[in-house]
Image (spheres, grey):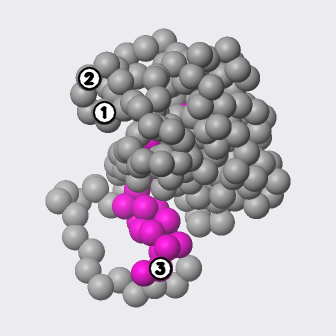
Amino acid sequence: MESATLLEHYRGPRTANELSKINSCTKSVLSALISIAIDKNIVPHPDTPILEFFPQLVQDSDTRKRQITITHLLTMTAGFQWNEFGGLNSFPTMTRTTDWVKFVLAQPLAESPGTVMAYNSGGSQLLAAILSQAFGQSVAEFAEQQLFRYLGIERYRWDKDPQGIHTGGFGLYLKPWDMAKLGLLYPA
């Protein structure tokens, strides 16, 4: 990967080699991993209903949940009633539960799937669970094998939920240059 450095500045002398939490950029890394997995036929077509991975949705009284697809999760159009940073249906509430996937799947739908975009780290956690299920190993192991090694990303940290699933919407820590490597994958 060749690029010319125009400017490099850090607040402290060690910052260049420190791992930094990339917060919601974790969602971009996860979506790249899901896309790689789809391309390699590890994860099924994006129009596949998530019911394939979460059969408990058959028992949900809102039958619209059975229509939620991988695409809906990737585009944050699943329809869940969700307020990212406040209220009962939120990211902070999810992180205080013992089962994040179960919490997200239990949220009521405010909209029909595919109709309205609502920023939702819970949907990203479902994507992480799907990738882990489909791959049969952890999200981080998939990242190492299918993306990080090709970019020379050797050191990182990735938080997990209580079930041991790597976080889908936040919680990945990278060095600044490794983050830049990911950014160079998406030219303007």
Q: Which residue is mark 1?
A: 83
Numbered disc total: 3
**Farthest right residue?**
41
* Viewer-side residue, 146 vs 75: 75
Q: Is residue 13 left or right of residue 42?
A: left
Segment tinted magenta in the rendering: 166-188
Q: Residue 186, how many percent across, how many down? A: 49, 73
Write the residue at 69% across / 58% down: 36
Q: Residue at x 54, y 41 (%)?
A: 113
Q: Secondary structure at mark 2?
A: loop
Q: Describe the element under mark 3 as helix, strand or loop.
A: loop
**Considering only vertical position in the picture, is 88 above or below 136?**
above
Spatial separation of the CA atoms under disc 3 and disc 2: 37 Å
Q: Between marks 1 and 3, how big is the CA–CA gap?
A: 31 Å
Q: Is residue 160 magenta?
A: no
Give the number of the disc on residue 187.
3
Amino acid beneath label 1:
Asn
Mark 1: few/some/many CA within 10 Å (<14, 14-19, 20+): some
Residue 171 visible somewhere in the drawing: no
- Mark 3 closeness class: few <14, some 14–19, many ≥20 residues within 10 Å: few
Picture quarter with the C terminus: bottom left
Secondary element under disc 1, as helix, strand or loop, is: loop
Q: Are marks 3 and 2 in contact (CB under 8 Å)?
A: no
Q: Earlier in the sequence, mark 1 or mark 3?
A: 1
Earlier along the polypeptide chain: callout 3 or callout 2? 2
Compared to residue 9, the image places residue 15 above or below, namely above
Per the rendering, the mark at residue 87 is: 2
Q: Residue at x 26, y 33 (%)?
A: 85
In the picture, which quadrant includes the N terminus?
bottom right
